[in-house]
Amino acid sequence: MSDDTLDGRRLVVIGAGSGIGRELARTASAAGAELVLAGPDEARLAATAAELPGPALVQPVDLADEASIAALAARTGRFDHLVSTAAMPANGPVRDLELADVQRAFAAKVFGPLLLAKHLAGQAGPGGSFTFFSGVAAWRPAPERVVMATTNGALAFLVEALAVELAPVRVNAVSPGIVDSGAWGRPGRAQGRLPGRRGREEPGPPGRRPRRPGPRGAVRDREPVRHRHRPARRRRRPPGLSPRRGPRARSPSRCHPGGVTLLRFSPMLASSSERREFGPGWLLERKLDGIRALAYRDGPTVRLESRTGKQLAPGFPELTEALAAQPVQRFVLDGEIVAFDEHGATSFERLQQRMQLRDPRRALATGVEVTYHLFDLLQLEQYDTTRVPLSERKQVLARALRYEGPLRYTEHRVADGPAPLAEACARGWEGLIAKRADGAYQQRRSSDWLKLKCTADQELVIGGFTDPAGSRAGFGALLLGTHLTEGGGPLRYAGKVGTGFSTAVLHGLRARLDDLVRPGSPFDGPVPERRPHWVEPVLVAQCAFTGWTREGRLRHPRFLGLREDKEAHEVVRESFREGQGT
C-alpha cells in the first residue's frame, strides 16, 4: 500500500487521534483516500478530521467492548485497507495503573483491533489488507526516569495467527522500533510512514543523531535510552494456527474481549532410539535428567504439573514466582525441572530431596537449587500453538519470556550429519534429544522426538521386595519389571536392585511398600527369589545399569530414586546398545 494506490480507496484508521495514527491519516488523505477514523476519543478524532484535506468519517468505538466493535464493523461497510496504531504508545503523562486498568488497556490496544479485523474480513475489497503498528515506548516523566512498555512480541505473534485465519486478506505487523513519546509534537519531528513506503533519513531535534528508517520504512528514534528492545521481526506465517476450543478447555477468562480459554495438555514423549545420523530437518537439544513439568499461567494463577497431572508448585516456589513475573499473562509451557551437582551435571538423586516436599519453606530450606529449562510453547494467550512447526514455536518461546533467575531457555543446534553424542557424553550430559524441526506437538509418545542416551538408565516397576539381611534396615532389594507394551500388558521380571539406598530411603520406602502388599506375584512368569514380598505394581523406580543379560535381566543396577511423575503402565524396556554414547 503506497501513496499512488490510495486514491479513491476507503481506509479505516484506528488510533488516528494522535501520534503515528494522525500522521498516517494526513498522508492517506493527501493521497486521495476516503478515511474512516475510529477510536475511543471522539474529540481527538474530530480534531484530526478537521486538519485533513479530504473527507473523513469519525466513528467512536470502545475497543475493549466486543458489542461496540461489532457495531462499528456494521457501520463501516465496504472498505479497502485497515490500519491500526492502537498498540503504539499513547502521548500523555504516565500514571499509576491498577491491574484491571492494565488488562483493559491491553485488550483495547491489542485484542480490540484484531477482533475488529475479524468482523471486517468479509467486507474487504479486492486487494484489501490489515496493517497493525506496534512500538516500544520510552516515556520520560522526569529527567532521571525512563519507563519502558512494549506490545511488540504479543502483537506480532497474534497478527501472524490472524493472517492464517483471514487469508487471502493480507495481514501485516509493522514496528517502528523505539519511540520517545515525550518528544512527539516537537518541531521537525516526523512521526511515521505508511507501511511499504520507502523511508529516508531525517534530522531529529537539535543535538541528536540523525534518525534512519526502521522496518518497512517507518522512522525510528535513534536516541539511546536506558533500555533498548529490538523491533519485532517478521517471521514466516505459521500454518494451522488458530484459536482452539474443545472438550479439554477450561472456562473462559474475563480479562479479554470474548474471553481467553486456557487449554489442558498431555506432554509429548520421546522414543528411545539408536539412530545417530540426522539431517538439517532435525534439531538437537541437551537431554536433561529431571522432572518433566508443564507450566500453566492464567493471569495471577500459576500451576506446575507433572506429566501425570500431579501438582508440583508447592515444592518449587521459586519457579512459580519467576513464571508469575513474566510480561505475558497467559501461557502453557513445557520443560524440565533439574538440579545440578558440583560438576555441572544434572543430578536426579539431588533433585529427590525436593520432590517429596509440599511445604514451600521446607523445600527452600533444603538448599537444593533447581532450574526450569523450557523447550516448548503450547499456548500463548488464546492461541493453541501445538500445530505450529517446532522451530517457530521455539522462536516465539525465546522472545516471549524473560529468562532470569531459575528460568532457562533450552538452546538447540540444527543437525547436519552424525549427532555429536560422544561430545555430549564427554561433557557429562545425559545425552541428546533429536526433534523434527517442522513437527507439531503431539500429546503422546512419538518418533518425531528421539532420545539418545549416554548411559543406560530407565524406569522400572516395583513388583516386590526381599527382607533385609544383617544390620540392614527396611528391605534387602527391590524386585523390578517392565511391561511388554506401553499402556499395560504383562509385567516381565527384569531383576533386582539392592544398592543406591540411604538409610532414610530404606525406612521411608519400606513404609510405602507395606501399604501395597498383595498375596500373589504381579510378574508374568517365575521370579527366582526365596520368600519374596509382593506389592501392587504402582511405584516406579529410576535405575542406572550397565546393560541387559541374555535372559533380560539388569546388569549391575543402582537405584537412583522414585519417579513420582511416571505412571507404572507406561514403563517398557527401552532400547540400549553396549557402549552407547562412546
Image: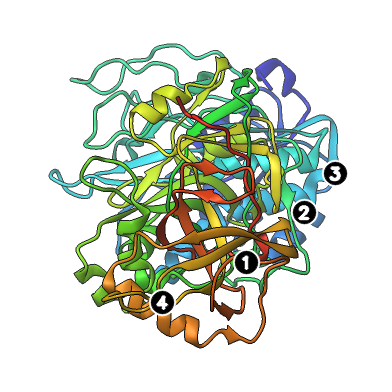
- Looking at the rendered structure, the secondary structure element under dot 4 is helix
Which residue carries the number 2 mark?
73
Check whether the beta carbons of the residues at disc 2 and disc 3 lie within 8 A of each other.
Answer: yes
Instruction: Quote the CA–CA distance across marks 1 and 4.
Output: 21 Å
> What is the number of the mark on residue 509?
4
Q: Which of marks 1 and 4 is in front?
A: 1
Front residue (pair 313, 94):
313
| 2 or 3: tag closer to the N-terminus | 2
| 1 or 4: tag closer to the N-terminus | 4
- Looking at the rendered structure, the secondary structure element under dot 3 is helix
Which residue carries the number 1 mark?
527
Q: Position of residue 12 (x, y in %)?
A: 69, 41
Up the image or down, 164 lies above or below 351; here it is above
Instruction: Quote the CA–CA distance across marks 2 and 3.
Output: 9 Å
Check whether the beta carbons of the residues at disc 1 and disc 4 lie within 8 A of each other.
Answer: no
Front residue (pair 477, 159):
477
